[in-house]
Amino acid sequence: MFEKSNQFLKDSTFPSFIYHFANQMIRLEGRSNPELLLASGLLSNEIFKGNVCIDFVKYSGKSSKHDFPENETELSFPNAKEWYEALNASKIVGQPGEAKPLIMEKQEGDCLLYLNRYWQYEDRLVQIIKEQLALGHHHSTAPGSDDIINKLFSTTAGTDETTKSAALTALNSPLTVITGGPGTGKTTIVLKILALILDEHQQINPTKPYRFKLVAPTGKAASRLKESIIDRKRELVHQKLISEGLSDLIVEDASTIHRLLGYIPGSVFFKHNLNHPLPIDCLIVDEASMVDLALMSKLLEAVPQKAKIILLGDENQLASVEAGSVLRDICLGLRNNELYRHCVVTLTKSHRFSSEKGIGQLSQLINEGKGKDAVALLDQYQSDHDSEIETREGAIAWETVPKPTGLFSKIKQHYFDHYKQLIRAESIEQAFQVFNNFMMLTALRRGPYGVEQINQLIESILISQDLLVKGKEWYSGKPVLIISNDYRLKLFNGDIGITFLDPETNDLRVYFKMDDGFRRISPYRLSNYETAYAITVHKSQGSEFNQVLLLLPPGETPILTKELIYTGITRARNRVIIMGEKQVFIKGINKSIERVSGLRHKLAKKKTDVRKSSDIESLSPEWLDVFEDSIEPVKPLVQLLAANKLPIPETEYESDTLDEAMVSELAWPGHHPPIAILNDHQKEFQQQWIDNGWEIFFVSESPSEELLEIILHKLGA
């Protein structure tokens, strides 16, 4: 079994690192363990495919040919029970929280195996989200708050009840997720939320500025967010929904997550973290569907306890390139938790496209997995083509994909003029305008229908028309896409540049659009880039173009899913053309990405392993003293703490470094970090406690189960 498993992992259908990782685990184990070898290799492969962990039920008792038909070695996978018992006996496989390379966790009937660091990322993210939500609701006490709410969210301001609900949830909740497709008004809602927060803050604490940050995963997405904020601010002022003074308080700057956290060269860590949090009062994350598990965990860990978090995104889009489907898992998890389902608001009304026509209707059918209906709509649109509808509703069109030999003539015939305009642009501003007018998106990276060969094909068309010189790498009009972060040049994954003559030196430079204009960089300084006449759907996330051509391969491929097709067509503002084979298109829509993780289940469930409260009669003398010294809202917590045999706290604790009026109900000053329980009336002192290194929890008249669970977890229950 061991040798056969080794041969299976060594097959060319797997990347070579999977075989080497599995054997490294065996070396750490120090003995032959075929179940561990196979589990380690498959886990590595799952992470490579974007999953956070491996679920043994998926493979239990099956033939390897079921999931790996092209692998020359066939074997039968162990059943889940055998796998669990073999791994449970391994010295390198631990239970949750243990310091071992692999972590195994039973969850909802599944048996999940993680790399330790991914288990930590997931567990930490769950803790952060639950701790954030346990802070409870905030209700505005500022005079006139109802007036500005009614003004911003009146029917004359173009808002409906769902939009108003989303804004009020974000205003009152410490963590909110707002999800919706393109054109559903996510940016407008954010502006109105900020207006409400700033208006309240100005009335209550006018001398202290309110600090908020806008971030997105890529430079392109951050740039689009900034442009949207500027446009929406102008609209709201023009509509007299907010004043010029309030508009000036809303900062327009948006950065990438990496810039905000502070990259450390040669390290996977950032300058801002749990011990050195960001100096902010509110964090707004746009395009959150693109953020992977590791980055989301590190980002939210760096947010101070008191700060508000708002996640924006489209849960139906493609998930992140790296491991995890974080936004979708958060949405599904919180929706299935009765305590927190109100914190996820879904916007369904598009202000850009009608749900009954064009791009809006097509994207809805794709999301619902109705491939045949989507094709019928495309056929109907072709026969009932109306140029007026095309302008107003988002035009859709279908073309049959040609054979590889026919791609040259197809692109030359229909799309050559666009590339010609880009090459002949008279200014860099005109070049960017032309570039953003049309984009060809591909599902694949390699092969005749992949982005690499399509870009080469477009260059060969330009050469055939004497617009380019063969063999010349750099020329005016060449678009490039940065494919990995370059901190030396301060360029980030997703940044788009266009090559153009520098009027000052007459040399070619690559121009990148920045907040204050254009940044010029010598093309010979760039290292991690690719030509960008066409880009993959994955790389297009966070971008929009007036027109999009979505090029799909003529044969089935695992990467072609409804999420990829939906993401591709919703990059278009005005018109999308889908080029493919109808049966392949239908099968792609009927297939969905399901990434394996434990995040959604951990957010949805309540723990049941905490002991019930002790009766007053069974309290020890020490706990009885604490109980009698506590105010009524704290007494249930004291009974619960006593039942779980946790350290006895100090009551009415006064810290030497704090004002005399700042007295906690319960405190564990010797804990790391020290923990204090305050009542709701002490919220005005929250920041002073935090600034002195304390972790603070508030107990209201009826403490939530979730709050009790988190406090117990913190104290070691």
Image (cartoon, rainbow, N blue to C red):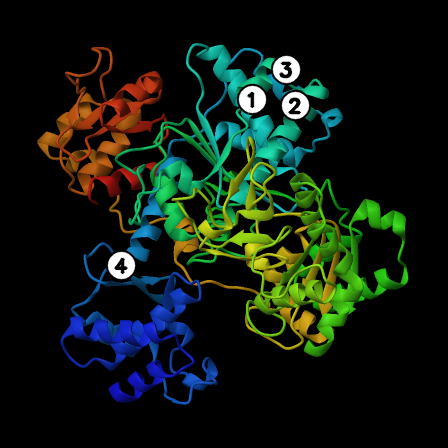
- Whether residue 216 is situated above or below residue 137 in the rendered picture: below
Looking at the image, which is closer to me, 486 or 114?
A: 486
Label 3 CA crowd tier, 10 Å (few <14, some 14–19, many 20+): some
Decide if residue 316 is in sight here: no
Q: CA distance from mark 1 to mark 2?
A: 9 Å
> Could you tell me which quadrant the C terminus lies in?
top left
- Disc ID at residue 152: 2
Indicate the secondary structure of the residue bearing disc 1.
helix
Name the residue tied to disc 4: 116
Looking at the image, which is closer to me, 194 or 489?
A: 489
Q: Earlier in the sequence, mark 4 or mark 3?
A: 4
Indicate the secondary structure of the residue bearing disc 3.
loop
Q: Is residue 306 left or right of residue 387?
A: left
Q: Is residue 146 left or right of residue 54?
A: right
Of the two numbered discs 2 and 3 in the rendering, the one whose residue sits closer to the viewer: 3
Q: CA distance from mark 1 to mark 3?
A: 12 Å
Three-letter residue code for mark 4: Asn
Q: Quadrant of the rendered structure where residue 109 is? A: bottom left
Name the residue tied to disc 3: 243
- Whether residue 440 is situated above or below residue 154 in the rendered picture: below
Of the two numbered discs 4 and 3 in the rendering, the one whose residue sits closer to the viewer: 3
Q: CA distance from mark 2 to mark 3?
A: 12 Å
Of the two numbered discs 2 and 4 in the rendering, the one whose residue sits closer to the viewer: 4
Name the residue tied to disc 1: 196
Q: Position of residue 501 (x, y in %)?
A: 61, 44
Q: Position of residue 612 (x, y in %)?
A: 26, 44
Q: Earlier in the sequence, mark 1 or mark 4?
A: 4
Q: Who's the residue at 69% across and 70% down the image?
A: 586
Residue furthest to the front: 505
Indicate the secondary structure of the residue bearing disc 2.
helix
